[in-house]
Amino acid sequence: MAPSVMPQPVLDDTESRNGPMKAPTPIQAMSHGPVTLAGLPTFQSKEEKRQWQLEHMAGAFRIFARHGYTEGISGHISVRDPIEEAFWINPLGVHFGMLKASDMILVHLRTGELLAGNIRRPINATGFHIHAAIHKARPDVQAICHAHGIHGRAWSAFARPLEMLNQDVCNLFQTHSVYAQYGGLALDGEEGRRIADALGSGKGCILMNHGLLTVGSTVDEAAYLFRLMEKSCEVQLLAEAAAANGNLKKNIISDEEAAYNYSMASEAVRVFAKSCSVMEG
């Protein structure tokens, strides 16, 4: 059963004399040792932050390519720009596995004008409408990932949320939704607005007959959640197939346990492993 209170730090005599310490953050509670995982880096300028975001954006695309989240010219990742009222998005028709930071394109959030970056190429029109609608509706969202993974597309056909079948999917407990209609290619703003409405204040959305979409406070977080959601769709499909003959019963994690897991493990993902960052080369 989930603990009723957050784990407390062990106090030595000095700490006891000086009064109780603050309760640890979830990442501190899970870190055994003298240090905890590092948080976001600090930047000397907005330009420096922009470059860091673009490099991590390229890293996310390399990971998507590695796991096969490529289907023709579909799929896009966007990152809100720290300077302009705009966001960066990938060019149309460049394989995810080949993208570099310098390939990304800056597009104005309101007008759709291409402002900077590799403007010799176009961007995906559906990508603009979906990402612009979400960035407008969710000022807290810094990055958005959308792609057509195999298992996400398969599970989306049922227009059902994921069940809490295991510890990992609890990172999406009560924070993912279903867009239970299909409006075709989002070649105008209305379909993008409907997707943004379906996402609401959550971290992810299952788009019926379409695929998956996730958001985050960094591109690292949004990409991690997409990978988690895609894998969770695969697990769900396997469990459904195994239970289809009626001889096996699915055991679902209780809301209490799922909520505890979520509170302890769903902090924003801060940084990729160093090997996942893709620089200009």
Image (cartoon, rainbow, N blue to C red):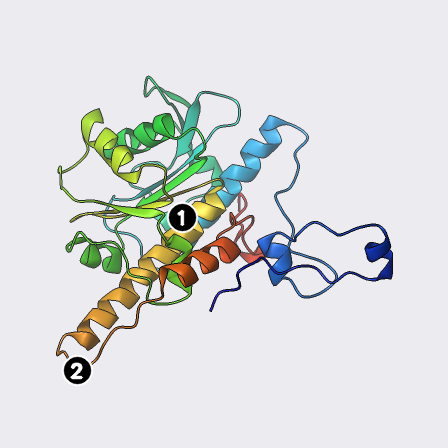
- Label 1 and label 2: CA atoms lie apart by 47 Å
Q: Where residue 149 sits: x, y (%)?
A: 27, 55
What residue sits 56% from the left and 35% below the top? 51
Task: Say which label, 1 or 2, has the lower sequence index.
Answer: 1
Q: Is 62 on the left or on the right of 182, as rendered? A: right
Location of residue 11 with respect to 210 vertically, above or below: below
Q: Name the amino acid, label 2.
A: Asn
Residue 231's disc number = none
Location of residue 126 with respect to 59 vertically, above or below: above
Q: Is 267 on the left or on the right of 108, as rendered? A: right
Of marks 1 and 2, the one in the foreground: 2
Number of on-image labels: 2
- Quick one: label 2, few (<14), some, or many (20+) residues within 10 Å? few
Q: Quadrant of residue 139?
A: top left
Q: Where residue 199 sits: x, y (%)?
A: 30, 39
Residue 247's disc number = 2
Q: Quadrant of residue 44?
A: top right
Location of residue 164 with respect to 133 vertically, above or below: below
Residue 66 visible in the snapshot: no
Q: Where residue 76 sits: x, y (%)?
A: 33, 41
Residue 71 visible in the snapshot: yes
Q: Quadrant of residue 12?
A: bottom right
Q: Which residue is mark 1?
A: 98
What residue sits 47% from the left and 47% below the top? 221
Check disc 2 and report its element: helix, strand or loop: loop
Q: Where residue 2 sits: x, y (%)?
A: 48, 65
Check disc 1 and report its element: helix, strand or loop: helix
Q: Name the amino acid, label 1.
A: Met
Q: Is 124 on the left or on the right of 3, as rendered? A: left
